[in-house]
Structure formats: C-alpha cells, structure tokens
C-alpha cells in the first residue's frame, strides 16, 4: 500500500513529537568543541612556526650576519709569495775598444743626450788599443774620461769603498773634494775587462784655476751613465 506524501509528513511529526532535546547541554557542548578545535589549530600553527623558525635559525647560523646565503665564502687572504730576484749573468769581457780618443767628447754628449755648448772646445786626447784619454770642456769646465784595459787591484779600493755589483762589475765613486782650489768628483767602473773613469771639475783646469761654479757641472748620476755605458766597447 502506497503511503501518500502527506502521510510521510504525519509519520515524521508523530515520531518526533515526544523528543525534547536538552538545548542548554547541546549549546554548551558545541561551545566546548569549538574552543577545543581553536586551541588545536593554534597549537598546530605554533608548532609549524617553531619549525620554520628553526630552519631559518639554522640557515642564519651557517651564513654570516648580513651575508648572502647563496654566496660562496671567499678564502682567507694570505700574503702573496715573495717573487724571486732574477739572477744577473756576469758581463762578458769586451773584445776591444770601439771609440777613438778624439771621439770621446762627442760620445759623452750622445750618452747624456745633449748638444755641445759654444765654449765646449776639445782639449787633449790620445791613446792606443789598451788605453784612451780625452780632456775637454763641458759648460766651460774641465771633463776627463780615461779608459784602460785591466782589472781591479786591492790598492785601488784601499782608501775608497768599492761597490760590488750583481753583474760582476765594481764601481768606485769619490768626491766632491777640493785640491789646489779646484773642486772635482768622479766615478770609476771596472767592467768587461776595462776601467772607465769619468771626472768633472768646477774650473777650466784641473788645478790652480779659478772656480767657475760652486760644484762640477756633471752630477754623480751623469758620471755613472758615462762610466757604465757599453758604447765604449766593441
């Protein structure tokens, strides 16, 4: 027998007429369950936050303050190695002299890159294959260049200090000193089997000549250039 829809409604109402729900108890239970869920949600959020901060803290411990976590730490700087001083090969003996005595004055001007002054007249010059000498004026004052074959002797460095150089040569510098009213200084350089001496005076003559300047016109540096040049040798 088919029950009409109105009968279904009637049966449902009759089945629930005697139900009296405890509304107060249900509401209180709902509130309690709601609070419990909220506490669990907060606890879960806090645990997740602690885990995240723990990961961040571990990363921060591995990266310096203010550093880039993806950057590779540069190695600690150390002192660079000290470069080795290159060795200097000893000078080979010269095969002979390349500049005649009467061309020494012109050669000095070339070494010092200067043009001769109007009063720089040549003086005496001469020599042979073993020894050559030239006396001439430089800015009106006497200059002497002497080139001699031979090596250094102990007596030549007895009164002055000789300097031993890495290429095996020896250099002696003296002055300025004054004698017979004339001030002079000079450089002698023993190299390649010869000695080359360059001297500069502050007067037109080597002695008993009136000074033309407080000091000789050629400096020690210029005298070193003259005495240390390879242009003299063949």
Image (cartoon, rainbow, N blue to C red):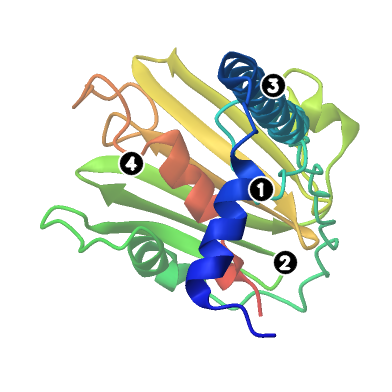
Residue 69 shows up from this direction: no
Given this view, does label 2 or label 1 mark the residue nearer the observer? 1
> Dot 3 corresponds to which residue?
36
Q: Which mark is residue 194?
A: none
Count neighbours of disc 2 (C-alpha within 10 A) and say few if under 14, some if 14 to 19, many if 20 or more.
few
Nearest to the observer: residue 139 or residue 80: 80
Q: Residue at x 64, y 84 (%)?
A: 2
Tell me which residue sits at (71%, 23%) in the image: 43
Split into 4 quadrants, where in the image is the N terminus? bottom right
Choose top left, top right, bottom left or bottom right for residue 26.
top right
Q: Which is nearer the eye, 27 or 31?
A: 27
Name the residue beneath numbered marker 2.
130
Q: Secondary structure at mark 1?
A: helix
Whether 103 is drawn above or below 200: the answer is below
Which of the two residues, 165 or 143, is positioned nearer the viewer here?
165
Give x and y (percent) for residue 234.
66, 80
Q: Earlier in the sequence, mark 4 or mark 3?
A: 3
Q: Is residue 63 left or right of residue 31?
A: right
* Front residue of this view, candidates 172 and 21: 21
Assess disc 1: are there few (<14), some (14-19) or many (≥20) residues with their C-alpha within 10 Å of its C-alpha.
few
The reply to whether dot 4 and dot 2 touch (C-beta < 8 Å) is: no
- The residue identified by callout 4 is 142
The image position of residue 175, as x and y in percent, is 51, 21
């Amino acid at each position: 027998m088919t029950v009409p829809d109105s009968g279904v409604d009637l049966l449902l109402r009759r089945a629930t007429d005697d139900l009296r729900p405890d509304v107060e108890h249900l509401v209180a239970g709902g509130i309690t369950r709601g609070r419990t869920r909220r506490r669990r949600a907060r606890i879960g959020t806090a645990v997740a936050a602690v885990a995240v901060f723990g990961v961040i803290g571990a990363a921060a411990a591995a990266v310096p303050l203010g550093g880039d976590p993806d950057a590779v730490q540069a190695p600690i700087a150390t002192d660079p190695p000290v470069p080795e001083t290159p060795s200097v090969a000893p000078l080979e003996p010269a095969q002979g002299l390349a500049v005649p005595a009467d061309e020494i004055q012109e050669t000095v001007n070339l070494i010092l890159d200067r043009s001769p002054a109007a009063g720089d007249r040549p003086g005496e010059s001469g020599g042979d294959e073993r020894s050559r000498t030239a006396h001439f004026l430089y800015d009106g004052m006497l200059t002497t260049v002497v080139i001699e074959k031979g090596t250094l002797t102990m007596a030549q460095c007895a009164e002055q200090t000789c300097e031993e150089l890495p290429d095996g040569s020896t250099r002696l510098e003296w002055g300025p000193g004054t004698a017979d009213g004339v001030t002079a200084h000079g450089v002698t350089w023993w190299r390649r089997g010869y000695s080359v001496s360059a001297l500069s005076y502050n007067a037109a003559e080597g002695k008993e000549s009136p000074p033309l300047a407080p000091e000789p016109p050629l400096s020690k540096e210029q005298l070193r250039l003259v005495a240390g040049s390879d242009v003299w040798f063949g």
